Amino acid sequence: MSDAILVFNAGSSSIKFSVFVADDDTLRLFLDGQIEELFSAPVFTVTGADGRRLAHTAWPQGHPLAHREAVCFVMDYLTQQLGSVRLIGVGHRVVHGGLQFAHPVRVDAAIAAQLAQYVPLAPLHQPHNLAPIHDLLERWPDLPQVACFDTAFHRTNADLEQMFGLPQPMFAQGLRRYGFHGLSYEYIAGVLPRFSARAAAGRTLVLHLGNGASICALRGGCSVATTMGFTAVDGLLMGTRSGSLDPGLVLHLMEQHGMDVRAVQQLLYSESGLLGVSGLSSDMRTLLASDAPRARLAVDLFCYRIRREIGALAAVLGGLDAIVFTAGIGANSPVIRARVLQDAAWLGVDCDAEANAAGGPVISSATSLVDVLSIPTDEEQMIARHTRALVRAVCSQPKEPAAAGPQTTT
Ligand code: ADP
């Protein structure tokens, strides 16, 4: 009988899941799926590792399917489908681990309560990430669960990098730069030695360019700085998020435009970015295919913001050995990669046009002073690995009362 790990990535209106089968030391994707459009017109789809559609269920418009029912639906489906495959643990993507959780943690009711304390730090994501954890604790209390955090990878950042210019006591209260996309960066840092020893050991910028977008500066595979800060709205221009802006602008919007907190939140998270600038779409493929001047402007601003942040982060690192592109845009768009690399030519970056068009992984020319790579990320695989490691660690320990503090994995 094979062992399997289930990975949940629960958002506000969708729950994504993947099942990995543990063959010896590898984790092989078995299937993945999602329930989208919760609360409106839910659709459940499952795809096998070979790309074959395994299941499709659509509920009528207005069906009130919520997270709880969706989790039960997925679990019931998997119970039927997994056959002789034994589920040994469930890993969850959790956006915020605060200062306390610098590593994944096995979740029980007490840890779940601690994670709920971070809801005010990530009100749009944390409650949804935690919902399946609570559901499973209630219905399958013996099934081991592990929380993996988007913030954890950046806990290596120096205090100076994490600080805002606010009164010092606020720093200790948690008003600081946390950084996000940590599971993606951790995955990339883990595979870099396969592609470039220099990128793995040296000063490397990883550009995670998807609907959410950020850059992480790595030194020797550890996070030194990143463009997202207290929240995931900071830094680069994104699909619908504004990225960095002057905090005084928020005050102006509230004072002069009569906007309340909810209205500003809606503007900055859902109506800005590529969508807001283009007035057309948040989807990079649509914008690249369009001749509309505002679509071009949105792409220009996207690339310009990357150019600025590359300069800033190269300064933080004191030079640059490698650039790595990943996520939907980064790993799939030769056009955007070429533009970003052209803008970084002053750093000695030279792109091999043919290799870039072919998708890499190495896309720098032989004469480039900086290694450039394009590597797909795999956050689910990272979560599955952490989950398996923690489940195994606990299983191999003699039975004793549950520890109060977080458990860590290496
Ligand atoms: P998320 O942050 O939601 O995980 P993804 O990493 O899947 O997002 O990235 C989605 C983005 O990637 C979209 O803007 C999409 O247009 C873009 N994208 C995917 N494939 C391509 C491509 N071939 N060329 C340009 N953009 C692409």
Image (cartoon, rainbow, N blue to C red):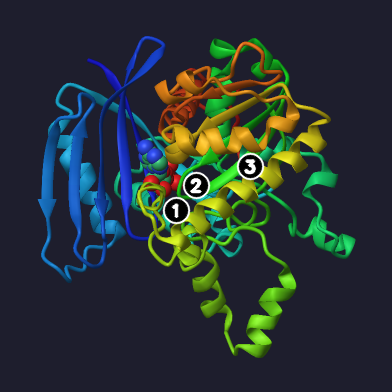
Element on which disc 2 rests: strand
Instruction: Specify few, some or many for label 2: CA neighbours under 10 Å numbering under 14, 14-19, or 20 or more.
Output: many
Which x, y percent locates residue 18? Answer: 31, 35
Q: Which residue is mark 2?
A: 94
**Amino acid of disc 2:** Val
Give the Cα separation between the discs numbered 2 and 3: 11 Å
Which mark, residue 101?
Answer: 3
Which x, y percent locates residue 188? Answer: 55, 26
Question: Does residue 122 appear to the left or right of 84 in the view shown?
Answer: right
The reply to whether dot 2 and dot 1 touch (C-beta < 8 Å) is yes
* Quarter of image, ligand 1: top left
Q: Which residue is mark 1?
A: 130
Lower position in the chain sequence, tag 2 or tag 1: 2
Which x, y percent locates residue 405? Answer: 64, 40
Residue 153 vs 233, above or below: the answer is: above
> Which is more foreground, mark 2 or mark 3?
2
